[in-house]
Image (spheres, grey):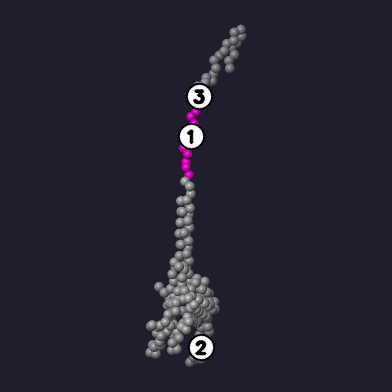
Amino acid sequence: MPATFFSGGKDGAGGALFVTFNSKDQSVFYRVIKQTGWNEQTSKPSFAGGAVINVKLSLDEVGEFIHAISGHDACKFYHSFNKEVTTGNFAYYEKEFNGKTGPVKTRGFGFSVKKGELAARIGFSLGAAERLSQYLQFVLDHIHSAIYVQDKKEFEEYLKKKEGNKPKSVVKPREVVETPEIENVETNPPEIVVEGAEDSISW
């Protein structure tokens, strides 16, 4: 399910952002739709039929968005494909204006995307930016898990193939050596009598 963000104004320069990902090919996609109108009664922008800018982000670029949000910083990207250039800028801002009760300070992030002559801007409150950051972290967790599973599968297949290529060892039958039977030998030799001797000697 994609994460969605949108903002717009009477100038019609706003946009909507849809963030999706694909774990298998390690891709993260930004789909930006340009604002097409403004409803005076509801004070809300409309995006029906708006021009679309598609951006494919690398994992490092996703990490840069997370870093920019956590540190109230900025990040950029520049993509060129088939002689078409797509650029993006995401940056923290602080603005102050005069309200009914005095000066009011606002903080947030602005995201601008441009492809050729087509451009769109999307504003993020601090809460919306944090939601984007957590979704992108969720995306990275899933992609890293998919990478781990794939690496483990390939390693197990490698071990299985390696084991299958080993030459099978031949077990030779054991040689049986027959032991010759030994005849019983009397341990007590017969008494030998020597004539002329007074006593018999035995051993």
What residue appears at the point 55 percent right and 17 percent down from the top-left corner?
189
Q: Amino acid at mark 1?
A: Glu
The quadrant of the rendering that contains the N terminus is: bottom left
Q: Position of residue 19 (x, y in %)?
A: 44, 75
Q: Mark 3: few, some, or many residues within 10 Å (few <14, many ≥20)?
A: few
Q: Which residues are magenta?
A: 169-183
Q: Which residue is mark 3?
A: 182
Label 2 or label 1, whichever lies nearer to me, is 1
Examine the residues drawn in magenta and state their main secondary structure.
loop
Whichever of labels 2 and 1 marks the residue nearer the N terminus, that label is 2
Q: Considering depth in this image, is 1 or 178 the residue closer to the camera?
A: 178
What residue appears at the point 38 percent right and 83 percent down from the top-left corner?
48
Q: Amino acid at mark 3?
A: Ile
Direction top: furthest residue: 196
In magenta stretch: residue 182 = yes
Answer whether residue 72 is visible to the viewer in this image: no
- The mark found on residue 175 in the picture is 1
Answer whether residue 85 is visible to the viewer in this image: yes
Q: Mark 1: few, some, or many residues within 10 Å (few <14, many ≥20)?
A: few
**Label 2: which secondary element:** strand
Q: Amino acid at mark 2?
A: Val
Q: Which residue is mark 2?
A: 104
